[in-house]
Image (cartoon, rainbow, N blue to C red):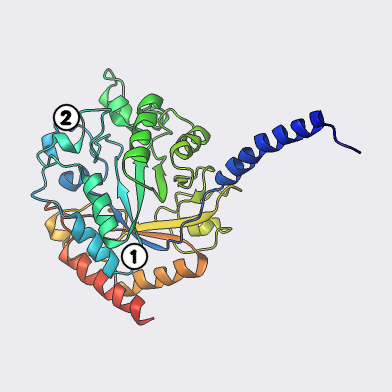
């Protein structure tokens, strides 16, 4: 069939319109980062309270480290054979470890007066490490002021506390637009979705960082990553590998992750000095590293800095041995 000038013009317009759309669709498929072993940094109010969940603190001066050495964190991670840092930006207490514009409840208003995330970003770049971020979806600063103390022990109410979708969106936008590429978000769903459902949360993050993966813990079937709090190495298809807080499978998962504290148990933050010599063995950590390589997992080993802003000597010695074992292999 002979094409008229009108037909040719129409064909040209169709091709030029659909070509960018095809490219856009392809861009929506995130690149899977080649990461296996990372350091999970939990350093916040709970570092000073000796409690995993810290409530009732009203003054930013409670967070009062004698120093901070993000270069040390990254140097030790690199020497241990790690390729990324997973950083706790905000726990359920709502205290922000970056210079957010959304609240005064932040680290730059503490005695430290430094944007910890910004310093860490620069240290990661210096040592060639990728950056991933932990973010608590719920925020206890959003709990109604007239709530009675006894309500905190009622799961049916407690579960839905701390919801503010606009706050969540504003904070995630800051994290996505001011601190460079983010490998993935570890969304803590332990205290609700924060008022923004998980499909909307994923879409919001990818609007700013299309290649950033997003995972939700606590048995939430959503996102790109099957998170494994207190988990172990295992194939993507095995729910058991995800740990006790994630037994749900989901067809959108592209990676399986697992994490646990170097202290053992569920002690994610630095505890009292009496525990300074408590640490998992290098052999345990190394064997799980080998498992992560075998199954293609993300393995984020939690190592909580102390009240001086530095890693414990025990942790450094252990990780130095792990790094030597990895290099020997």
Q: Residue furthest bottom?
A: 328
Label 2: element kind: loop
Which is nearer the eye, 210 or 15? Answer: 15
Residue 82, which numbered label? 1
Question: What's the residue at 72%, 35% (across, down)?
Answer: 12
Residue 96 sits in quarter: top left
Which is nearer the eye, 29 or 139? Answer: 29
Label 1: element kind: loop
Q: Residue furthest front?
A: 5
Is residue 288 depicted above or below 45 in this figure? below
At label 2, counting other C-alpha atoms closer than 10 Å, the crowd grade (few under 14, some 14-19, many 20 or more) is few
The N terminus lies in which quarter of the figure? top right
Q: Position of residue 85 (x, y in %)?
A: 32, 56
Q: Can I make out residue 103 in this image? A: yes
Q: How many marks?
A: 2
Is residue 282 depicted above or below 92 in this figure? below
The C terminus lies in which quarter of the figure? bottom left
Is tag 2's residue or tag 1's residue first in the polypeptide sequence? 2
Q: Can I make out residue 51 in this image? A: no
Question: What's the residue at 18%, 53% (across, down)?
Answer: 271
At label 1, counting other C-alpha atoms closer than 10 Å, the crowd grade (few under 14, some 14-19, many 20 or more) is many
Alpha-carbon distance for marks 2 and 1? 36 Å
Is residue 93 depicted above or below 302 in this figure? above
Please identify, in this view, whether the residue under mark 2 or under mark 1 is nearer the observer. 1
Q: Position of residue 117 (x, y in %)?
A: 25, 45
Q: Position of residue 323 (x, y in %)?
A: 30, 73
Which is nearer the eye, 131 or 219? Answer: 131
Q: In the rendered image, which residue does mark 2 sit on?
A: 58
Q: Residue furthest top?
A: 146
């Amino acid at each position: 069939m002979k094409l008229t000038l009108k037909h040719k013009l129409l064909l040209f317009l169709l091709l030029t319109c659909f070509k960018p759309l095809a490219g856009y669709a392809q861009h929506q498929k995130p690149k899977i980062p080649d990461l296996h072993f990372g350091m999970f940094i939990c350093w916040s109010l709970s570092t000073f309270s000796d409690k995993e969940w810290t409530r009732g603190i009203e003054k930013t001066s409670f967070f009062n480290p004698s120093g901070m050495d993000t270069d040390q964190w990254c140097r030790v991670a690199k020497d241990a054979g790690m390729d990324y840092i997973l950083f706790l930006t905000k726990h359920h207490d709502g205290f922000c470890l970056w210079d957010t514009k959304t609240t005064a409840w932040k680290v730059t208003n503490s005695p430290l007066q430094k944007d910890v995330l910004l310093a860490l970003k620069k240290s990661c770049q210096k040592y060639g490490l990728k950056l991933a971020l932990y973010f608590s979806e719920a925020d206890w600063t959003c709990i109604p002021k007239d709530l009675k103390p006894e309500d905190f022990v009622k799961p049916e109410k407690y579960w839905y506390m701390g919801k503010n979708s606009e706050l969540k969106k504003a904070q995630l936008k800051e994290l996505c637009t001011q601190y460079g590429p983010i490998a993935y978000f570890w969304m803590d769903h332990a205290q609700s979705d924060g008022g923004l459902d998980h499909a909307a949360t994923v879409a919001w993050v990818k609007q700013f960082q299309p290649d950033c993966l997003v995972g939700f813990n606590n048995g939430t079937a959503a996102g790109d990553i099957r998170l494994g709090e207190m988990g172990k190495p295992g194939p993507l298809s095995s729910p058991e590998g995800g740990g006790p807080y994630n037994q749900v499978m989901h067809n959108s998962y592209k990676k399986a992750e697992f994490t646990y504290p170097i202290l053992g148990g569920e002690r994610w933050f630095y505890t009292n000095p009496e525990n300074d010599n408590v640490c998992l063995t290098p052999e345990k950590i190394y064997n799980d590293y080998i498992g992560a390589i075998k199954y293609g997992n993300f393995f984020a080993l939690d190592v909580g800095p102390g009240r001086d802003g530095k890693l414990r000597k025990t942790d450094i010695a252990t990780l130095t041995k792990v790094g030597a074992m990895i290099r020997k292999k």
